[in-house]
Image: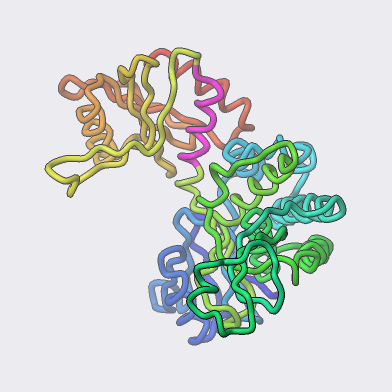
């Protein structure tokens, strides 16, 4: 599919003939929150101007065109953040992932891994469960429902209660749903697309198709017979969090693959801290603080670091933007969070090299630290942790 390629947070101009009015209407209607599109005017030198502020991925318009938004950070940093958030190193050889030279190649490698694991499971036999059924049959199966039979003894069929040992269960339905989303997305390379299609067809006719969300991948129960479903569901979570099935089937070919970089950066820092904080400290992401009766007004604090006993050591707020100094509203926000949690220190974390000395505002200390994504993740972490350690 032809594509327009732009870079996140960089305004890109296109000749007037590159987009039709119908294309522009589709961008405004479908992706207005992710991609800013300005019409050709004197200010844009009579060209279209596109800007994605913090979103990366593939945004299909129709069979003839899609927009690819490339990350502003190096690919190794993007892949590294995904690695931490989804524990991909436990699922796929990390060297294979980091060898990918495009986001599409990375996406294709994960899709292939899911398909290969599913096909391996099909060869061994899909997980099955006993599902209860109640229906009238011409012969007795299971137990006779005596009460139902007494209500209508004249009927020739028998009300039976029985269990059927079937593979059409949520563990398999979840994977089937994700495979068809990947197929509809059309973002894989040819080899991966063929493998995913093969895996999907292996389930078709056996497993029904019903929608699932990312939360359905978390907290599932496994035993020794279904342990190999755990990594498959982890991969399903990755796809469900980034593929948007918001448009009607058949409306157009392809589904958006959308990455909210600000949210990914926040989740990455949380995952990194969980692995590197000393044992007496732990981090809580997205902590809700209610104000007033009934929680009508509330805040969600990005990250809270506290001792095992419960005392809050500091609050942290991630800011996925380039900055030389913290903005006044960033400072106001982190000071408010520190006040709400009753701690002395608030830390602002930026994905770029930022140098600003700590300062005191009232009785709160505000610290600005970089987790510089221009560097490889291990190197950026080595610089980040010593700077943070003095405040926790």
On the question of residue 135 being in view, the answer is: yes
Residue at horizontal 84 percent and vertical 62 percent from the top: 191
Q: Nearer the viewer, residue 27 or 111?
A: 111
Q: Which image quadrant for residue 156? A: bottom right
Q: Nearer the viewer, residue 141 or 118?
A: 141
Residue at horizontal 66 percent and vertical 71 percent from the top: 184
Pick out the residue farthest to the left.
293
Pick out the residue farthest to the right.
123
| Residue 145 locus on image (x, y percent) | 56, 66
Query: Magenta residues?
Result: 265-277
User: In the shown orientation, is residue 213 left or right of residue 111?
Assistant: left
Which quadrant, please, contains the C terminus? top left
| Residue 217 locus on image (x, y percent) | 57, 49
Disc tally is 0
User: In the shown orientation, is residue 321 left or right of residue 224?
Assistant: left
Query: Does residue 274 sit above or below 50 in this rendering?
Result: above
The dominant secondary structure in magenta is helix
| Residue 186 locus on image (x, y percent) | 69, 69
Query: Does residue 211 sit above or below 307 in this rendering?
Result: below
């Amino acid at each position: 599919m032809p594509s327009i390629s732009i870079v996140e947070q960089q305004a890109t101009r296109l000749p007037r003939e590159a987009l039709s009015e119908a294309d522009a209407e589709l961008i405004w209607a479908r992706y207005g929150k992710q991609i800013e599109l300005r019409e050709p005017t004197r200010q844009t030198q009579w060209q279209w101007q596109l800007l994605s502020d913090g979103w990366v991925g593939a945004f299909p318009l129709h069979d003839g065109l899609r927009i690819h938004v490339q990350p502003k950070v190096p690919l190794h940093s993007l892949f590294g953040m995904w690695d931490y958030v989804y524990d991909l190193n436990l699922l796929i050889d990390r060297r294979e992932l980091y060898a990918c030279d495009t986001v599409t190649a990375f996406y294709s490698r994960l899709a292939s891994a899911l398909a290969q694991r599913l096909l391996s499971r099909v060869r061994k036999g899909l997980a099955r469960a006993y599902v209860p059924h109640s229906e009238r049959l011409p012969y007795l199966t299971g137990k006779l429902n005596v009460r139902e039979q007494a209500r209508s003894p004249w009927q020739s069929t028998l009300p039976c209660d029985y269990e059927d040992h079937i593979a059409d269960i949520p563990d398999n339905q979840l994977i089937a749903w994700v495979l068809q989303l990947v197929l509809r997305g059309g973002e894989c390379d040819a080899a991966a697309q063929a493998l995913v299609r093969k895996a999907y067809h292996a389930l078709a006719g056996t497993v029904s198709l019903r929608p699932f969300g990312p939360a359905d991948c978390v907290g599932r129960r496994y035993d020794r017979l279904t342990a190999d479903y755990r990594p498959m569901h982890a991969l399903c979570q990755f796809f469900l969090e980034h593929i948007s099935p918001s448009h009607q089937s058949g409306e157009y070919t392809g589904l958006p693959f959308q990455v909210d970089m600000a949210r990914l950066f926040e989740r990455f820092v949380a995952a990194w801290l969980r692995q590197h904080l000393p044992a007496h400290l732990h981090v809580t992401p997205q902590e809700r603080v209610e104000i007033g009766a009934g929680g009508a007004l509330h805040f969600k604090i990005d990250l809270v670091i506290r001792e095992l006993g419960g005392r809050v050591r500091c609050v942290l707020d991630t800011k996925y933007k380039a900055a030389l100094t913290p903005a006044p509203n960033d400072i106001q926000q982190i000071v408010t969070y520190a006040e709400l949690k009753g701690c002395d220190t608030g830390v602002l974390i930026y994905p770029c090299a930022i140098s600003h000395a700590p300062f005191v505002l009232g009785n709160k200390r505000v610290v600005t630290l970089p987790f510089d994504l221009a560097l490889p993740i291990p190197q950026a972490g080595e610089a980040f942790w010593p700077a943070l350690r003095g405040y926790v």
